[in-house]
């Protein structure tokens, strides 16, 4: 479970880098507050499916 959570935070960090997180902090957060909620829900669903697959294989 910890591996999936670390992978999720890595994807979220790359998402922030894609929005020039270090160059323009407030601009990145303004984009995230509007659009990345759906991306967050998609990643959360992906993590949930991967956890179910791990439980079934083990």
Image (tube, grey):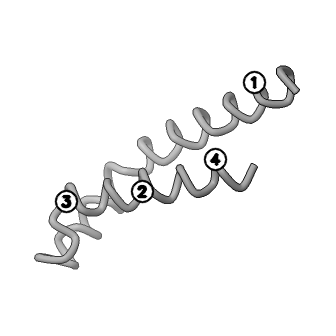
Mark with earlier residue (4, 1) = 4
- Of the pair 37 and 1, the residue shown nearer to us: 1
- Residue at position x 83%, y 21% in the image: 57
Q: Secondary structure at mark 4?
A: helix
Between tags 1 and 2, which lies in front? 1
User: Would you say 7 lies left or right of 33 here?
Assistant: right
Badge 4 vs badge 3, beta-carbon distance below 8 Å: no
- Residue at position x 37%, y 50% in the image: 36
Crowding near the residue tagged with mark 3, few <14, some 14–19, many ≥20 C-alpha atoms within 10 Å: some
Between tags 4 and 2, which lies in front? 4
User: Would you say 47 lies left or right of 30 here?
Assistant: right
Q: Secondary structure at mark 2?
A: helix
Label 4 sits on residue: 4
Q: CA distance from mark 4 to mark 2?
A: 12 Å
Q: Where does residue 9 sit, x and y in percent of width and height?
A: 50, 59
Badge 1 vs badge 3, beta-carbon distance below 8 Å: no
Q: CA distance from mark 4 to mark 1?
A: 12 Å
Q: Secondary structure at mark 3?
A: loop
Badge 2 vs badge 3, beta-carbon distance below 8 Å: no
Q: CA distance from mark 1 to mark 2?
A: 22 Å
Q: Where does residue 53 sit, x and y in percent of width and height?
A: 75, 24
Mark with earlier residue (2, 3) = 2
- Residue at position x 22%, y 70% in the image: 21
Q: Where does residue 17 sit, x and y in percent of width and height?
A: 24, 62
Q: CA distance from mark 1 to mark 3?
A: 31 Å
- Of the pair 5 and 45, the residue shown nearer to us: 5
Numbered label attached to residue 53: 1
């Amino acid at each position: 479970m910890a591996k999936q959570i670390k992978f999720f935070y890595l994807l979220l960090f790359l998402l922030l880098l894609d929005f020039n997180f270090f160059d323009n902090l407030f601009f990145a957060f303004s984009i995230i507050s509007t659009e990345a909620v759906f991306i967050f829900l998609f990643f959360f669903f992906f993590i949930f499916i991967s956890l179910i697959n791990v439980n079934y294989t083990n």
